[in-house]
Image (tube, rainbow, N blue to C red):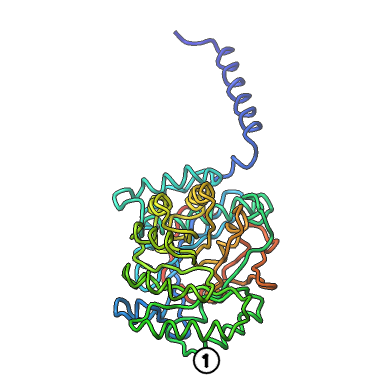
Amino acid sequence: MTAPAGADAAKSALSAGNATVIAASAGAATLDRIAHLKLSSITLPLADPISDAKVLTGRQKPMTEVAFLFVEVVTSEGRTGVGFSYSKRAGGPGQFAHAKEIAEVLVGEDPSDIGKLWTKLCWAGASVGRSGLATQAIAAFDVALWDLKAKRAGLPLSKLLGSYRDSVRTYNTSGGFLHTPIEQVKENAAASLAEGIGAIKLKVGQPDWRLDVARVAAVREFLDDDVPLMVDANQQWDRATAMRMGRIFEEFGLVWIEEPLDAYDAEGHAALARALDTPIATGEMLASVAEHARLIEVGAADIVQPDAPRIGGITQFLRLAALAESKQLEIAPHFAMEIHCHLAAAYPIEPWVEHFDWLDPLFNEHLETRDGRMWISGRPGLGFTLSEQARAWTVGTAEFGHRP
C-alpha cells in the first residue's frame, strides 16, 4: 500500500527535524571528521655514536640515529594534530609499514572518539598482537588525536587532562653515556645544571664493576650534595651482581637505580626493591600496559618508567598512570619529553621527566628549563610544530583521505 503524499512529506519533515535536533544536541565538535592523514618516516642523525652498557657487553652496536614515525591529522574543518612514535637502532621502517596498513580505517571518523579509534586501529592489525611494534605504530596516531583534541579546546594537553602543576622535575641523561670520558661527564653535568635541569643520571653496567663505582664516586664528589643523582644499568646485571652493586651504591644516596635486571624479570626487580634502601626504577622497555601491570602487581618498581610511544600512546599511558597511582607509585616517563611533560604534569604524585635535547632539531618550539624543572608552555596541544629540518630528514611519506 502506498503512503499518501502528505504522509511522506510529514515523514521527511520529521526526519529533517530529528537530524537538526541530533546535530544541535551533539554539538559542533562531533560533526567534524578526520579528512586526511599524512605519515612521515623521519631519520634523525646523532652527532656522536651513543654507547650504554648494552654496547660494552656486546649486545648492541653504538646508536647513530633515531627513526621517527610522525602522523599529521587534518579534519574536515581544517583542524590539525601532530603525533609521533620512535625506534632506536631497529624497527623504524617496520613501524612506518604497519602504520600505512592501518591508517585508512581512521578516515571519516570523529577525531574526538580517541578510545574507540585506538581499539579500531588495534583490531585493524590484530594479527601482530597488542604489544611491540604494533602498539608503537598506533601510538603516533593516538598522540596526534590528543594533540588535536587539546588544540580544539584551546588548552595545553596537560590542562585538558587536568594538570596538578605547571612544571615538572627534570633530569639529564644524555651527558652521562658510557662512551663519554669522565671529565667530559662532569662538564656535561655542570652545563646541564646551569641550563636549569635539576638532576643528573649516569649510565653504569660495564663489564668491570669497579669502573662503574669509580665513575659514580667521581661525579658524586663533583656535584653538590643536594644535587639528585641516578644511575641506569640498562638491564645488564644478573640478580647477584645487581644486589651487590645496589648495596655498594647505597652510600651515594641515589634517587634510583634504573633497569638493574632484564626488563621482564619481575621477581628479580621485586627482590631488589625489598632489599635495598635505594628505590628501583624500571619499565621503559615495556611495550604494553599489561607488561607494566605484571611488574606493579609483584612490587617490582618503586618508580614506574612508562614510555607513551612504546606502550601505545597517551590513551594507554593514562590507563597505566591510573594503575600506578592506585599503588602510590612515582613515575618517571622515559624519553620523548615533548609528550611526557604534559602527562607528568597531570599525574597526582610529583614525577620526574627525562630531559633529552636530541629531538630539538625536529621542532620549531622548545621546552624551557629553570630552577631544576621543565616548564609546560601555554601553547595549545603538545605545543610543537615540525621544523624544516624534520622535513629535510624525511625518508618516506604516505597520505590517506583528502585535504579539505
Residue 306, given in percent of the width and then of the height, sits at 47, 59
Type of amino acid at the residue the image marks with label 1: Glu
Query: Could you tell me which secondary element the residue under label 1 belongs to?
Result: helix
Tally of marks? 1
**Is residue 103 visible to us here?**
no
Horizontal side of residue 91 vs 199, given as left or right: left
Quarter holding residue 272: bottom left
Residue 342, compared with residue 241, is above or below; it is above
Between 252 and 362, which is closer to the camera in this rendering?
Answer: 252
Q: Which residue is mark 1?
A: 183
The residue located at (64%, 70%) in the rendering is 367
Above or below, 266 against 91 in this view is above
Instruction: Report whether 215 appears left or right of 9.
Output: left
Q: Residue at x 57, y 69 (%)?
A: 386
Where residue 249 appears, x then y in whole percent?
46, 75
Residue 92 placement (x, y as % from top left):
38, 68
Q: Residue at x 36, y 69 (%)?
A: 235
